[in-house]
């Protein structure tokens, strides 16, 4: 749902108090790009196919289908990989228009951690003059011309590439699923965008879709702080979900996560 982050932003504003007015909050919704197609496949299957375990099949189709869809044929023009990156860029441009030099803190849930990491990794490759094989950073000028009808300013280009990013919080992150088959020497995280950059990764040991990142490679061990939590544990109404895989959807309701993001924002406002 496009309103998926409203509760998170409300919780952060409450914690920030008087500082909330200094924060420009934006959400990125790219699942509509994927789910409309997935819904059509499911409806055709349900109407004409003989399949069992409908709920489990829908979970696999939507959950694993998101990951597979973003990676499969991502190099073709107009791929869902490219379209998802375009949504990130659009949200950043909207924030840049309010305050061009603001430090940015990204918050990414589940597959969003992989999507955002790929976006920043591609942007850093492009900034270094290296070839990018897919997405908007393969030719950011062409993307801007098509999406905006103009060229990016120097300030916009830096901002869109994460050049002012001072923090990243990932929750229920599944980056390991995408890189675990590679040799450790090839598992390379993004470079710290700024000297202030801090990456906190929250995972629940009961969440099979949420993983620690430090075991991936030396690069991740240096860059990321993993924090194991019981997502949603102790909160009325979610106890039945806090101790099993359903905890994957509880991170943004957890006080430890909200407190950590708010602390990052307060640090940057000081």
Image (cartoon, rainbow, N blue to C red):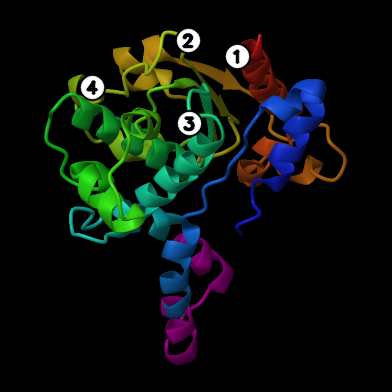
Q: Are marks 2 and 1 in contact (CB under 8 Å)?
A: yes
Which of label 4 and label 2 is nearer to you? 2
Judge whether residue 1 can be spotted in this image: yes
Residue under label 2: 196
Q: Residues within 10 Å of mark 4 (few under 14, many from 20)?
A: some
Q: Residues within 10 Å of mark 2 (few under 14, many from 20)?
A: few
Which of label 3 and label 2 is nearer to you? 2
N-terminal of the two: label 4 or label 2? 4
The residue under the point 73% across, 44% down is: 7
Which of label 1 and label 3 is nearer to you? 1
N-terminal of the two: label 2 or label 1? 2
Label 1 to label 4, Cα distance in Å?
A: 33 Å
Residue under label 4: 184
In this rendering, the answer to whether 10 lies above or below 198 is: below
N-terminal of the two: label 1 or label 4? 4
The residue under the point 39% across, 42% down is: 115
The residue under the point 44% across, 79% down is: 40
Image spot of residue 128 (x, y percent):
18, 24
Image spot of residue 13 (x, y percent):
76, 31
Q: Residues within 10 Å of mark 3 (few under 14, many from 20)?
A: many
Q: Tell me: 21 left or right of 93.
A: right
Q: Is residue 51 magenta?
A: yes
Residue under label 3: 211
N-terminal of the two: label 1 or label 3? 3
Furthest residue toward bottom: 48
N-terminal of the two: label 3 or label 2? 2
Which of label 1 and label 4 is nearer to you? 1
Label 1 to label 3, Cα distance in Å?
A: 27 Å
Q: Are marks 1 and 4 in contact (CB under 8 Å)?
A: no
């Amino acid at each position: 749902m496009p309103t998926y982050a409203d509760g998170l932003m409300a919780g952060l504003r409450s914690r920030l108090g008087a500082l909330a007015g200094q924060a420009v909050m934006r959400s990125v919704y790219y699942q509509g790009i994927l789910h409309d197609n997935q819904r059509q496949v499911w409806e055709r299957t349900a109407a004409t196919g003989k399949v069992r375990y409908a709920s489990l099949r829908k979970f696999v189709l939507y959950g694993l289908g998101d990951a597979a869809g973003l990676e499969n044929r991502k190099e073709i023009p107009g791929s869902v990989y490219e379209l998802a990156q375009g949504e990130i860029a659009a949200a950043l441009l909207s924030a840049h228009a309010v305050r061009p030099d603001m430090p940015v803190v990204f918050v990414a849930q589940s597959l969003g951690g992989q999507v955002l990491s790929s976006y920043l990794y591609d942007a850093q490759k492009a900034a270094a003059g290296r070839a990018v094989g897919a997405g908007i950073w393969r030719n950011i000028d062409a993307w801007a011309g098509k999406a905006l009808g103009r060229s990016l300013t120097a300030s916009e280009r830096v901002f869109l590439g994460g050049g002012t990013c001072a923090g990243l919080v990932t929750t229920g992150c599944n980056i390991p699923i995408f890189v675990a088959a590679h040799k450790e020497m090839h598992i390379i995280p993004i470079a710290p965008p700024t000297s202030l950059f801090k990456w906190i990764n929250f995972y629940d040991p009961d969440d099979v879709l949420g993983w620690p990142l430090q075991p991936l490679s030396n690069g991740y061990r240096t860059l990321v702080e993993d924090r194991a939590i019981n997502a949603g544990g102790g909160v009325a109404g979610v106890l039945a979900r806090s101790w099993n895989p359903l905890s994957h959807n509880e991170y943004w309701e957890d006080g430890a996560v909200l407190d950590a993001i708010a602390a990052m924002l307060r640090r940057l406002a000081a």
